[in-house]
Amino acid sequence: MKATKIFNILLFCILVLSCSKDDSNKLFDDSDGAYIRFFLLVNSNNQVLEYPEISGGLVAVSLYEKNNVRTLKIPVAISSTKITDATTATFNSSIVGDIDLTITPQSTLTFSPNKLVDTIYVSINNRWDFSKLQQLKLSLTSVSNEKISIGIPNVLEPNNELTINFSEPSFQYTLEKNRIEINGDSGEEVFFKVNFPLGYFENEINENDIFTFLNGFDYTLSKEKQDDTSITYKIKLNENIQNDDVFYQTVINLIDNNGYLATGNKTLQVVKPIKTQRDISVNTASHFYNLADQFYRTYGETWNDFNKDGICQWTSYNAFTYPIVVSADNPNAILYDDKGTTDPSDDIYHDAFKIGFKTPNTITTTTNSFNLKRWFSNESTSGINSPGFDVNPALEFFPENGNSTTKGTVLVIPQYITIAGTNGNSYSIAISGDGTYEEYSPGLFELKFQLKVTNDILFGGTITAEYLLYNNNSYPDPQDLTTSNCVTEYTL
């Protein structure tokens, strides 16, 4: 009797499973009729995939916890590719709480044989009461084509309804870059972007509130364009700054304001460097990169006591090294690739005297510029938190007499970099320095330079470190130094 009962239960489960259709991870399927449903895919980082981005490993959700203020784009899909007529579908929306939303379209979706996916856009207009439940409920209510059913024929997850809960967001912003060079012509325009990875409210962002300025020349700052996750600003010069013997600089700092936390790059330098006559055919920078090898690196040594044992020594490191791409009118531009065409618009130019260090991969990783990752015990190596581990541009070469192919001086390009700890502490660090370079042996260049880093909280002011850098790893063991410039490890 007991065995019969268990058998009946198992048989019932098999029948239920065999009659249930689980296509929540398939966008289109013609195997069993046609249906319409919500197709919102969310990855493990709670990020919504935007159609046509698809991942076969993800299942469409019926509940989404929204923790940002970007516009939410909700795909609604008809499963069958065999529809032949224009089709409409309707949906209802209801809001729990006092959150101010704009929903587009308001109730009707449209489809056609060439358009099997339509999108519902949900925008948040203002801040809301974070202490109360804020929720949006959407449900599909009708479809004009009677052959199309509402929801997957699956009692477990039909995707005919979707609930969005709005949790308290984290407001963040960051500067896309930390340095811009200008020519110094009156009327010249350059642009920079402020990124808001989790979105923002337009009425809360005013350049007079989010920036502080240290101005070295006259210019006008204006908002150029914006979208859900960024604002582009324009700097227009109001004066000629053409003295080639003077270094001109304006510094714009992004600050915490109104709940928006400045992360990543927080300082932007707009500079007109001192100009020096150099023969671009020397192309010193070309000895330090190889774009045919995406993992090409330069190799360095740092004079240090990272182990804090009282003994200074050289420690080796390497960093991915790249040219600096410039426009054709840059005074140090040298043609790298004409793309095999006579059209100059697609030509690629490199700076003949500058190189940079950066990762060949995504923004979440960084390279080890100047061995800085060894300077700290608890560094975050993410490019989001510590963009300063990628220094690009980093070094500039000045050939002896402007035309030497074998030796000259090297400059650490002065700039502000941002490095953060795994504990969330973030620091803006000023770097600079200089030294010499020489062709040590045929094809092998050696750089000897000092790196100066400044931050009052971390270092108590400015400290100086000694470096060697080579364009390949076939260099001799360096001789010990007697200098007191022996960098140690710091806690962020």
Image (spheres, rainbow, N blue to C red):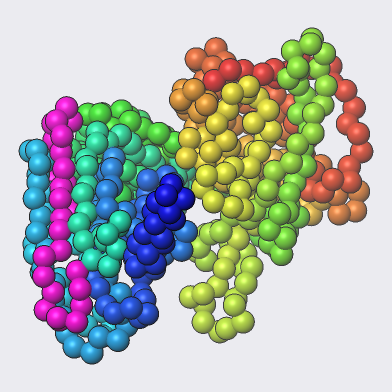
State left or right for residue 246 relative to residue 91.
Answer: right
Instruction: Give the residue at x 51% y 74%.
Output: 346
Residue 453 visible to an observer of this rendering: yes
Q: Quadrant of residue 260?
A: top left
Nearer the observer, 479 or 246: 479
Q: Which residues are magenta?
A: 121-150
- Whether residue 337 appears in magenta in the rendering, the answer is no
Question: Which x, y percent locates residue 405?
Answer: 79, 54
Nearer the observer, 246 or 453: 453
Examine the rendered structure and indicate whether residue 65 appears above or below residue 453: below
| Residue farthest toward the bottom in the current orientation of the protein | 84
Nearer the observer, 485 or 70: 70
Question: Which x, y percent locates residue 427?
Answer: 48, 25
Residue 243 visible to an observer of this rendering: no
Question: Which x, y percent locates residue 242?
Answer: 43, 48
Instruction: Give the residue at x 28% y 84%.
Output: 114
State left or right for residue 444 relative to residue 386.
Answer: right
